[in-house]
Amino acid sequence: MSQSLSHKIYSNPEFVKQYADSIIANPWNAYYERPASMSLLPEDLKGKSILDAGCGPGIVAKSLLENDGVVTAIDYSDTMVELTRKATEGKARVLAMDLNKGLETFADAEFDIIYCSLVIHYLDDLQYVFGEFARVLKPGGYLVFSTDHPESPALKDKKISGKQMESVYWKSFGIYMDVYHRTWQEIEETLQGSNFHIEQIITPQPTETCKEKYPDEYTFLKENPHFICVRAILTNKVISRNEAIDLVAWNDLASLDINERYDIILDILDEVPVDAADEKYDAEIINFIKFQLLNVTNEYLREILLKIQHVHFAIEGEPMLYEVCACCGYRTIRERGQYDICLNCFWEDDGTAEDDKVSAVNHMSLKDARNNYQQFGACSEEFIKYVNKHPGKYMKG
C-alpha cells in the first residue's frame, strides 16, 4: 500500500515541528478538542496503564504522567516520537508504531485505558484498529477517542462513507490533508462489533480562553461542529442505571451492621426502632440508600458491581446532576442554601459563598474548609471517618 498524503505530511520533520508548536495553544486543539476529550478520562488515573495511541508531540502523555498514570505513547512519526520522549523526560514508554499495522508489540489485556485523539479518520481499516484496541484493553477498560464530526463543515461535500479524500484544507498550515469520512452509524456499529459499549459522546464547545484569545474562531466553533469525542467501555454486559443502583443498594443493605441500621431508621423514620434488625424496615432503608446513590458516577457503580458480581457492566443512564459543593467542588448538593450535607467533604451548605466569611453552621470559613479538604479530605478533621474515600464517586463541578 502506498503512503497516504496525511502519512507523508506527518512524516515531514519540518511540518511536524510546526504542527507541534501550534497545537500547544491553538483554538482547535488546546481550547476545543483536547479539553473535551480529556474530560472523558476517569478522574483517578493513579497506577492506571494508559496507551496514548497517536501521541503527537506528547502534550497529553505528559499530562497523564502528571496525574500518576503509567503511560505508553505511540506514533508513526519519528519526529513526534522524539518530541514525546523529550516532553515526558524518559518517564513514559514511547514507541514508533503505525496503528494501521496493528499493536502486536503489546500483550492481550495490557492496558486499562486507551486514549486516541484525532487519529482514526486517518486509518484505513477501522474494524481492524478497534479490534486491536479491544484485544490490548483489559475487560472493563476504557477507549476514549476523538475524530472528525460526521457533520463537520470541512466534510460537508464529502458524504461517501469510507472514501479517502485529498480535499480537506488546513488553512492554518496552507495544506490539504486526506481523511476518511465515516458516518456516525458506521463508527457506532464498528465499536459494537468489537464489544465496545458507548458510554458518553461530546460535541466539544470552545473554552472561555478561546473566546478571549481567538474571538472569531470561538464564534465559528460555537456554530459549527468540527470534532466528536467518545468514551466507550469494553464489555458486552449492559444494564440500566436503575438496575445498577438496585443491585448496589441491596448489597449495601446486607453489609449494614445493627448500629448502622439503627441510625438510618432513626434518621429516616424519626422513631426509635424496637428491633433494628426487623426486616419490616428493609424497604425504607433500601429507598434511603438508593436516594444517596442518585448522583454517584457510573464508574463508581461499575466498580462496586465488579466486586459483588464479578462482571464488567456497562451502565446506561446518567447520574442526577446536583449542585456543586462550595467546599470540595463536587456535585453533591441537591439545592444550595438548604443545609444539605456534602457526603464528599461533610460541609453543610448554608449558602455561604464568600471565602473569608465564617459559616454559622460549619463554624469556619470556606477558605479554612477548603484548606482542610486539601489536607484531610474533609472540611474538618473531625469528619474524616464520615466522608467518601472513593476518588471517582461523585462528579466534579
Image (tube, rainbow, N blue to C red):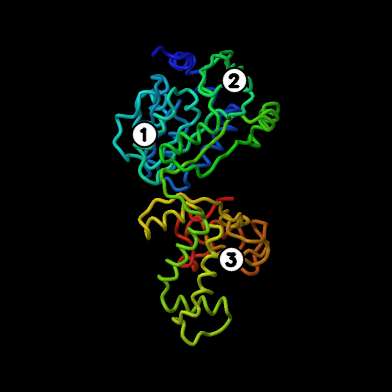
The residue located at (59%, 26%) in the rendering is 26
Q: In the rendered image, which residue does mark 1 sit on?
A: 72
The residue located at (52%, 19%) in the rendering is 163
Q: CA distance from mark 1 to mark 2?
A: 35 Å
The residue located at (53%, 41%) in the rendering is 39
Residue ranking furthest to the bottom: 274
Q: Quadrant of the N terminus?
A: top left
Residue 63 screen position, x and y as percent: 46, 37
Q: In the rendered image, which residue does mark 3 sit on?
A: 341
Mark 3, secondary structure of its residue: strand
Q: In the rendered image, which residue does mark 2 sit on?
A: 158
Given residues 67 and 295, the one toward you in this image is: 295
- How many marks the image carries: the answer is 3
Compared across the picture, whether 210 is left or right of 187 comes to right
Label 3: few (<14), some (14–19) or many (≥20) C-alpha neighbours in 10 Å: some
Q: Mark 2 and 3 residues: CB-CB less than 8 Å, in contact?
A: no
Residue 279 screen position, x and y as percent: 46, 79
Residue 206 screen position, x and y as percent: 63, 34
